[in-house]
Amino acid sequence: MKQEQLMPLYPMPRLVKWLAGERSCSTSVTYDIQERAVGDVERVRLNARLEEALAGSSQQAAYTGTPVHIRVSLQERLHPEGYIVQWDEAGLHIEYSQPAGLNYAVVTLEQLLSRQGFTWSCFRIEDEPDYPVRGLMLDIGRSKIPKLTELFRLIDQMERLKLNHLQLYMEGYCFEYERHKAAFPESTPMTAEEFRRLDAYAACRFIDLVPNQNCLGHMGDWLSKPAYRDLAEHPDGMPIDGPYPLTFPPTTLNPVDPRSLELIRGMFDELLPAFTSDWVNINMDEPFGLGVGKSKERSDSIGIGQLYMEYAEGVIDIVRSHGKKVLMWGDVLTRHPEVVERIPDDVTVLDWNYDSSISFAEHCSMLQKNGISYFVCPGTGSWSSLSGRTDNMLDNIADAAVQGQKYGAGGLIVTDWGDNGHWQVPAISYPGYAYAAGLSWYTKGNLHREDELKSYLSEYVFKDASGEIGHFLMELGRYYHLENSSLDNGTYLSTLLTRGLKSRERLVEELSLFLRIFAELNGATVNSFKLDFLYHDILDWLEKRKEQLEKLDLQVHDADVITDELRNTLRLIEQAVGIHRYMCRIDMSYTQDEVNCIIDLQSQLKLVIEEFNRLWRIRNKEGGLTTSTRAMFTLLDQYEGIRQTHK
């Protein structure tokens, strides 16, 4: 290892001091464990993990000479999650103050052995995190619920990134609530036993598995059922003015109906015993239509902000009755500063923003000024995009980390949502997971380290012998720059696949209306839809990505599945490009050209669906698959209709 090179670690450690000399590790190990550290060493399985890492090192032939002496000592002065690792002529010395710090020292050594092999320049690492809470939130509430084996693997990846907080977001029937299961016969939810197993697995890796259940907005799956529809703020939907008749479906509970709180109380009575965490995320975000339906009279009397807090306090009391503390989204609270003083001291606000053009600074400053405990929550940008939005993700996460640190945020949680069917495959989200982990661990040292991020993904996450996949994944999330679309929180090509085949004029009108509705619902500026789609440039981009994909040589257990998932992702993008071509009649002079385009699209989409279904079933539970693919089958029906018309 050359001393001028960076340590091959991600997240980058806080301090690396290079010492004189170089020596090789050995598969032969001796230990000197301080008596006070014995229990911690056993808890983190230090001996077994280091010996396994030595046996699996990337070096071709293990050095088996002089045994490596490993000394472990406890130093109370260190940060609870911090550690010191020194490698010199005397061997390996690990210092820590709490078991989590010892665990992260082992995580560091495991990665170093995997990526560097047996021969190291002598060094001293002194490391500790910037953010106490470093987390990931994965949406299992929209269509896709991973199998337990996949969630175990996700937790393993989180441990390697030194993340310590996991939430599985729920809004539909994602947990097997016994008293409600008859209303959701099509679902395959997580069970209490699965959550208990997951909770224990996470705890062994110093990850807090936090229960998560939406309690006001985003309750559409529940309110679509006859048994619960009367609990909605708008049981028959909320009419929206516009050029086409539109009714926004019921998604928000009626906060003045006591049965709403009773529903939530019953859900938490079943859900929370499966978790050991001190926290519960009650969400409470985006309560569309709040105060203008059944609760209008109360809202007119006290105001929407006060109405919201009245209901929120009821949910908070339910959580407190279980001896737990509340996490909740801050979108309503930041728009209604008149109720900020009502936020209890035992509540932590989750400030979310997924658009890189909007800084976290204003909200962070306001929350700090009012003495409110809060976390910053950027996003992976993978949802509603097919393959991510790389640069938006990088800038969004960087801004969250920098502003959160400046204004005293207690945590950083990166979110990975499942809007519109949850079509993104896991690999698409990994750059966002890793970048957020790096910046929440040590913001300054990992900021704008794209090359190191790509190397980590290639060498350690996917073990790609070609070294291509890190760059491939980052470039896969950059096609949106060729769309030049005014859509945010998603991409134009993804939208084409989910909205069905229609004329360009109708699509522009619908998307402009969509932007206006959600701007008004979220208190934002109204925008019209604009597009400058570089069709031929995107075709070139697709060919480059296909060529790059074929170079990958992954050495992980699910290498073939990952490659097939990425290949089908490119097929989805190509399908959307074809829809744009058909809609705009690009390179079409005759009716038969249009028919041939539809025939090709139909054939391609059948393959996409076949592969989508196969790959879904490998990683995920069956429930939700039909909902996820509904838009694909709508397109197939439209293609067939056009073919029949031109027979």
Image (tube, rainbow, N blue to C red):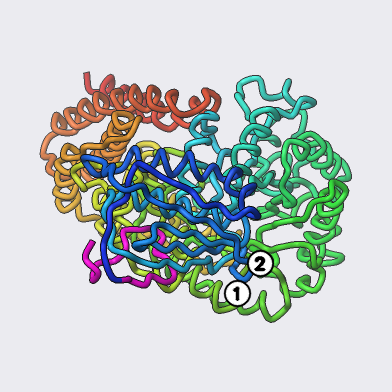
Judge by depth and name the residue closer to the eye, 57 or 317. Answer: 57
Q: Residue at x 34, y 57 (%)?
A: 390
Q: Do the residues labelled 2 and 1 touch (CB within 8 Å)?
A: yes
Q: Mark 2 points at which residue?
A: 374
Q: Residue 290 colored magenta?
A: no
Judge by depth and name the residue closer to the eye, 310 or 223. Answer: 310
Position of 261 relative to 189 (above/below) = below
Q: Which of the 4 image quadrants contains residue 640?
A: top left
Q: What element carries label 2?
A: strand
Q: Which of the 4 image quadrants contains residue 301?
A: bottom right
Position of 140 relative to 31 (above/below) = above
Give the residues drawn in magenta, as a range.
1-19
The majority secondary structure of the magenta stretch comes to loop
Judge by depth and name the residue closer to the eye, 116 or 402. Answer: 116
The amino acid pointed to by label 1 is: Cys
Task: Residue 521 in the image: state x and y as whole percent.
Answer: 61, 59
Is 487 on the left or on the right of 408, as rendered?
A: left
Task: Residue 522 in the image: state x and y as whole percent.
Answer: 59, 61
